[in-house]
């Protein structure tokens, strides 16, 4: 195969000809723009990128990308993306889902796709609500959320997507938000580079049905005190004055003031490559007001992907038995001939 | 029936055209193995064979109970046969429960071989016998042969170092040896099979061989066997044969289709009785490039298959009735996006969990209509175990040629039943030609998208050929980037479109595309009388029973014809013409009247149903009884 130089693409090259139908002010616009930007910098042929989505506002995404795209059915995108990878393991498959599509009806498939370590990049737009069907609560909605199906307040404890992804053994887990475009771009570039199941939770504001639910971290004036940006090899430090840190007291994380409660040396250093997911799990539990919400790459390990393990098995069978001879396969051990 | 030279002095040998024998015992008694071995031997010796295994759904019901009875019926003949036999010439029972459940099928004066050791009070109690049938005279009309199989078997294998429980497991081979003698079967292939299965366990191997030989010798030596039977070789078309079950044939057919189409197959399934075997077989064919995935559930299975088709492989999923229910939404996505998809439904008793190990053919209307909206799909059905091979290839051809989900409706009876298969020559099977576009196809057509003028050189994913089939464009092809989805789309461009006129146009277009499949399928063939008083109409695994009944009816001088639909949607193009040639129509089905409903609705014929929904195949006599009144 000759070495072809890939054409240099601009974000506009990733724009399809379709008029975008998200509500004005929807967080999805930002995510779309950063995705186009990030992909234009990824050294990978555009025709080999595929966007697969489920159902929801999030899942209209493929129509707005000038790549191959498949808008499938509610919750089942991971299964279709898996089949696609089995047919063509070399494609770069992105999966766009939401908190309803991916964690409610699609929860089961999400778990198994992550545990199989299929090499697909799952972007879960979490707006803590069902937008497309007009405002019912979702598996990530906070307890007490009042919606059309919970007029007296939701009585369900929400799930934390990153905790679930860790339980499902995802090999790449990251978190970002619609209101931090530069961060989204960086995270998506890292996601593109990962080989294996990648899970990215993107906090996304639904202007119409759940406006402001992420203001604590979306609002630039509040962000520093409420958000912890993870960087591999750096201590877990946050705060307006960069003087708050996370320390472990046994297995209990604590927010401490550096210089007052302890020294910088006592602060946990983030290791995104740690095989042991325990620390990552602790981080996934952080939520305001007691702890800062974490953003960045939470986990980044390398394991054999399902597709490569399958290819290995096919190759091993070939090596052991030789290429299959169908005419021979037709014949079993008990033949008889009629003259 | 002639009396030929006996194998032992004074022994009477009767030559007969066919024998139906059934092995019945507790689930743990090895009746399936015994039956399968008997079948293999008979096939190798040149008889035509047909089988009917009948086992419970549970893995192991309590030993000795009625619920735990497992049976295997073999019909072997010197003539061409199509059914496993209505009634038994010989019944082998290993315990009272097996006797209780199976005796009614034994012909008067039939041979009843009984394991007399297992008729103690406990076993009689479990089978709900108040008195011992071996002693109370209730078995007077049969030729009973009491054999203390437990004792004799233990005696035969005592030199092996097996514990009693393992020694007892050999008694099915004792029983097998006995009937081998009785029906002049050669033990060679069974001995070979034992060697291959237990070669690494010499104790077990030796014990089973000893049991088999002891059973054979017992028949020869003990003078309580009434007669030996001889069934000559059948006159079958020359060639090399093997025995095959429907599920085996489907697996081989799919791999054959893969080679004929030069395409990888990706099969994703969730284990379900009676379809799991297909995935088992395909999973072990990695040297053919077959990719299989055991999905987390039925929906994931069909999703993976659909994704694989989207990526350019042949996506296949296998299941039974309950799985089809779960897959309906994803099948509809395939209908809407017009992608190839093969859905194998090995039908079983329903509704709901129903009768997992019993046969039925009640998913036809589900295949036609079990989805929301107007959702036409291709539907075909094999008529016998060997036909499963041909129809599996057809399913792949239709799905890929017409970009449409295609149902292959098999059933538990032909899936597990066996018959001889004339091994085909792969070079003589027609190739499946698949083309993927690599160039834009819009030409200079004007407006192609909603916010701009037409651009030459675009790819239009729903631009159709003369059969209304859209191109199978694969992700990874430069310049053809486009999006597909489940929302209604504008024809040709594929852009989301809610306009009323477009929707109706698309509904009709998708329906017409499926109707166009009729151009590529064979005409309906009439067997028997080409015109006349009565036409028997069937589909699926009932072929053998109906064909045999029609054969017998014609021997009585009755003018009966038989058509058997292998293509259900669309029906063959000459179907209406065929119906015009007959006065009355009888539709035997293992359901409450599904093909009946469709034919009455579409062809306006006053067809009557012959419906049996008991989890068992038709007996030939049941069909013949319903033909009689038309000629009374």
Image (cartoon, coloured by chain):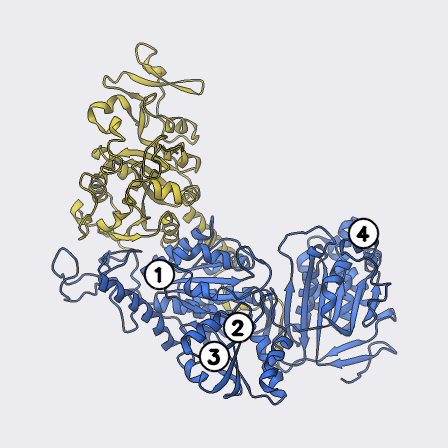
From the image, which quarter does the N terminus of chain B lie in?
Answer: bottom right
Q: Residues within 10 Å of mark 2 (few under 14, many from 20)?
A: many
Q: Quadrant of residue A178?
A: top left
Q: Nearer the viewer, residue B112 or B46?
A: B112
Spot occupied by residue B241 in the image (x, y as percentages of width and height): 59, 74
Q: Secondary structure at mark 1?
A: loop
Q: Give the labeled residue for mark 3.
A: B606
Q: CA distance from mark 1 to mark 3?
A: 29 Å
Q: Residues within 10 Å of mark 4 (few under 14, many from 20)?
A: few
Rendered shade, chain B: blue
Q: Nearer the viewer, residue B404 or B369?
A: B369
Kindly indicate which chain is depicted in yellow in the rendered structure: A
Query: Looking at the image, is mark 1 or mark 4 earlier in the sequence?
Result: 4
Query: Looking at the image, is mark 1 or mark 2 earlier in the sequence?
Result: 1
Do tag 4 and tag 2 residues touch (Cβ < 8 Å)? no
2 and 3 marks on the same chain: yes
């Amino acid at each position: 195969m000759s070495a072809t130089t890939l054409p240099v693409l601009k974000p506009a090259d990733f724009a399809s000809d379709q008029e975008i139908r998200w509500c004005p002010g929807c967080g999805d616009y930002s995510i779309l723009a950063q995705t186009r930007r990030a992909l234009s910098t990824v050294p990978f042929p555009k025709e080999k990128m595929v966007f697969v989505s489920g159902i929801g506002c999030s899942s209209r995404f493929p129509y707005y990308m000038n790549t191959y795209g498949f808008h499938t059915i509610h919750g089942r995108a991971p299964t279709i993306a898996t089949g696609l990878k089995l047919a063509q393991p070399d494609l770069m498959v992105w999966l766009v889902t939401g908190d309803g599509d991916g964690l409610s009806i699609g929860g089961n498939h999400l778990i198994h796709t992550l545990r199989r370590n299929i090499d697909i990049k799952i972007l879960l737009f979490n707006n803590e609500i069902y937008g497309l069907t007009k405002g019912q609560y979702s598996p990530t909605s906070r307890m007490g959320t009042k919606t059309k199906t919970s007029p007296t307040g939701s009585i369900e404890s929400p799930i934390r997507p990153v905790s679930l992804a860790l339980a499902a053994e995802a090999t790449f887990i990251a978190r970002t938000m619609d209101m931090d475009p530069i961060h989204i771009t960086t995270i998506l570039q890292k996601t593109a580079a990962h080989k294996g199941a990648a899970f990215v939770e993107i906090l996304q504001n639904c202007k119409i049905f759940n406006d402001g639910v992420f203001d604590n971290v979306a609002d630039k004036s509040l962000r520093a005190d409420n958000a912890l940006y993870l960087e591999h090899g750096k201590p877990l430090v946050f705060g307006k004055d960069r003087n708050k840190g996370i320390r472990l007291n046994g297995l209990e994380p604590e927010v401490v003031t550096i210089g007052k409660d302890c020294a910088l040396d006592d602060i946990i250093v983030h290791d995104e490559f740690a095989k042991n997911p325990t620390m990552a799990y602790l981080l996934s539990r952080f939520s305001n007001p007691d702890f800062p919400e974490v953003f960045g790459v939470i986990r980044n390990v390398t394991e054999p992907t399902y597709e490569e393990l399958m290819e290995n098995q096919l190759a091993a069978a070939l090596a052991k038995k030789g290429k299959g001879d169908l005419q021979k396969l037709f014949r079993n051990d008990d033949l008889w001939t009629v003259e | 029936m002639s009396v030929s030279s006996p194998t032992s002095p004074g022994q009477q040998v009767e030559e007969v055209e066919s024998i139906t024998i059934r092995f019945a015992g507790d689930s743990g008694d090895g009746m399936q193995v015994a039956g399968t071995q008997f079948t293999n031997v008979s096939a190798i010796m040149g008889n035509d064979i047909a089988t009917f295994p009948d086992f419970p759904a549970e893995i192991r019901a309590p030993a000795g109970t009625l619920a735990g009875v497992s049976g295997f019926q073999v019909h072997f003949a010197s003539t061409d046969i199509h059914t496993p036999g209505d009634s038994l010439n010989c019944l082998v029972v290993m315990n009272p429960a097996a006797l209780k459940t199976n005796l009614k099928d034994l012909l008067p004066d039939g041979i009843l071989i009984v394991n007399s050791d297992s008729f103690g009070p406990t076993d009689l109690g479990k089978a709900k016998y108040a008195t011992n049938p071996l002693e109370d005279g209730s078995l007077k009309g049969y030729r009973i042969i009491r054999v203390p199989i437990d004792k004799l078997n233990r005696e035969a294998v005592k030199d092996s170092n097996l514990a009693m429980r393992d020694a007892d497991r050999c008694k099915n081979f004792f029983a097998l040896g006995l009937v081998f003698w009785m029906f002049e079967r050669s033990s060679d292939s069974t001995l070979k099979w034992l060697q291959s299965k237990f070669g690494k366990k010499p104790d077990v191997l030796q014990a089973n061989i000893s049991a088999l030989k002891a059973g054979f010798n017992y028949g020869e030596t003990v003078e309580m066997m009434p007669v030996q039977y001889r069934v000559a070789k059948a006159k079958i078309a020359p060639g090399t044969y093997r025995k095959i079950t429907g599920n085996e044939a489907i697996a081989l057919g799919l791999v054959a289709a893969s080679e004929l189409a030069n395409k990888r197959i990706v099969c994703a399934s969730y284990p379900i009785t009676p379809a799991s075997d297909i995935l088992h077989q395909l999973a072990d064919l990695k040297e053919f490039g077959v990719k299989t995935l055991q999905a987390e559930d039925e929906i994931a299975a069909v999703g993976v298959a659909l994704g694989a088709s989207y990526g350019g492989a042949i996506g296949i999923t296998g299941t039974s009735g309950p799985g089809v229910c779960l897959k309906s939404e994803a099948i509809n996505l395939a209908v809407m996006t017009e992608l190839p998809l093969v859905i194998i439904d090995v039908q079983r008793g329903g509704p709901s969990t129903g009768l997992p190990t019993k046969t039925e053919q009640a998913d036809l209307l589900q295949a036609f209509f079990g989805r929301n909206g107007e959702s036409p799909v291709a539907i075909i059905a094999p008529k016998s175990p060997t036909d499963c091979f041909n129809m599996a290839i057809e399913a792949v051809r239709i799905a890929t040629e017409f970009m449409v989900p295609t149902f292959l409706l098999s059933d538990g009876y032909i899936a597990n039943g066996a018959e001889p298969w004339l091994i085909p020559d792969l070079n003589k099977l027609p190739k499946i030609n698949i083309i993927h576009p690599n160039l834009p196809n819009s030409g200079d057509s004007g407006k192609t998208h909603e916010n701009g003028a037409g651009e030459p050189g675009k790819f239009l994913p729903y631009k159709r050929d003369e059969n209304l089939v859209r191109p199978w464009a694969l992700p990874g092809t430069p310049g053809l980037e486009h999006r597909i989805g489940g929302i209604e789309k504008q024809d040709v461009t594929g852009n989301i479109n809610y306009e009323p006129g477009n929707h109706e146009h698309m509904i009709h277009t998708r329906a017409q595309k499926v109707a166009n499949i009729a151009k590529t399928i064979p005409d309906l063939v009439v067997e028997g009388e080409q015109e006349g008083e009565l036409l028997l109409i069937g589909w699926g695994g009932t072929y053998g029973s109906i064909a045999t009944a029609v054969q017998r009816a014609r021997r009585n001088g009755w003018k009966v014809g038989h058509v058997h639909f292998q293509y259900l949607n669309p029906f063959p193009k000459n179907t209406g013409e065929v119906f015009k040639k007959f006065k009355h129509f009888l539709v035997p089905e293992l359901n409450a009247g599904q093909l009946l409903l469709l034919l009455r609705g579409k062809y306006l014929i006053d067809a009557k149903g012959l419906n049996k929904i008991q989890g068992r195949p038709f007996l030939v006599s049941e069909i013949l009884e319903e033909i009689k009144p038309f000629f009374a």
